[in-house]
Image (spheres, rainbow, N blue to C red):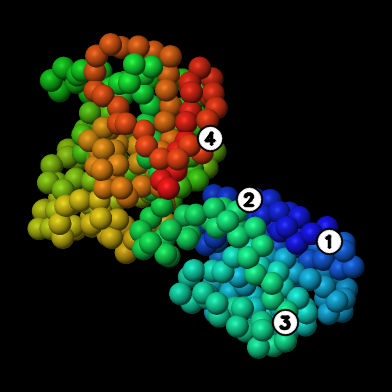
Amino acid sequence: MSHEEYMQIALDLSLYGMGSVAPNPMVGCVIVHNDEIISKGYHTAYGEPHAEVEAIRYVEDKSILKECTLYVTLEPCAHFGKTPPCAKLITEMVIPRVVIGTRDPFSEVNGRGIEHLKANGVEVIEGILEDDCRFLNRRFFTFHEKKRPYIILKWAQTADGFMDKIREENERGSFPISSSESRKLVHQWRSLEHAILVGPTTALNDDPALTVRLVEGENPIRIVIDEKGCLPEELQLFNNEARTIALVGNGVQARYNCEILPLEKSGVEEWMRVLHAANIQSILVEGGAGILNTFIESGMWDEMRVFTSNKNIETGLKAPLQKGKPYSEKYIGVDHLTVTVNK
């Protein structure tokens, strides 16, 4: 098998950590001896042993590691964090060759793991399926390289391009557009992201809980942009079902039953600065047209996920215009799902 084929197996393994390892990256590892895979490992959960440690652990005869090649999707760490450094373990086991998918952008690593391996006589091969390895951990890379969360914009629209009906004064509650299958998928998405974000209009009009109810999984952190601090405290966002953060204007005295983070100014760039400082690695934006268009106009977004139903309502609140490079499309029940990426 080729380096690429072994690395693909490591990539497939890493996916088992999805939803459990954040804010760490998903990482997979395989160990090869005489062209045969003798052990596999992946990072199972935040705070648990890394992929390399898991793979080495399951090699029964440790003496043959001196004749092995270790394949790993991300550069082995070189610092003490929740666990000891993997690069040090690899050299202690005298593994002679390590093949790496991509370097780790985290400042405590970022080449230091590779330097440690080479300084101790290990042959290092880099950049195998690098684009795939980076895309797998695009949230992690965006957080460390762009100093902001990875941003996914999501909405549902009718066949004739509306995302809400015309509401009467003080009318509250959600207006379903997508199918039950699509709504279940959205709940699965919520369970896989660090946080979910809405603006004040959606929080007030729809009164969403923003929790995972239709699938098993962890609730994301709920974030509401409320620069004026004027939302009523009885909204579901402010219950105790999940951690909630309110971003409010500097000096605003918001009295919500949640964490309050002050903003120095308005706008997406400031919101993301504050959320990056709060270690939020990814956000699913489920706001209304106003908040979505604000992100789109800023150019600060990474994915658009749009459901188009077979309904027509003829008038209502116009949905944002889709942008980006097509990534995938499929039907979820009766709805057409399109995903584009910002490139």
Q: Is residue 108 above or below residue 301?
A: below
User: Label 1, label 2: how many angstroms apart (C-alpha)?
Assistant: 19 Å
Q: Nearer the viewer, residue 103 or 215?
A: 103
**At x 13% / y 20%, what residue is drawn?**
169
Mark 1 lies on a secondary structure that is strand
Q: Which of the two discs, 1 and 3, labels the residue nearer the N terminus? A: 1
Query: Picture coordinates of residue 36 (x, y %)?
Result: 87, 62
Q: Residues within 10 Å of mark 2 (few under 14, many from 20)?
A: some
User: Label 4, label 3: how many angstroms apart (C-alpha)?
Assistant: 40 Å
Mark 4 lies on a secondary structure that is strand
Q: Nearer the viewer, residue 54 or 153?
A: 153
Residue position marked by numbered label 1 in the rendering: 37
From the viewer's perspective, tell me whether residue 332 is left or right of residue 285: right
Q: Which mark is residue 328?
A: 4
**At x 77% / y 82%, what residue is drawn?**
94
Q: Which of the two discs, 4 and 2, labels the residue nearer the N terminus? A: 2
Q: Is residue 283 above or below residue 43?
A: above
Residue position marked by numbered label 3 in the rendering: 122
The N terminus - image quarter? bottom right
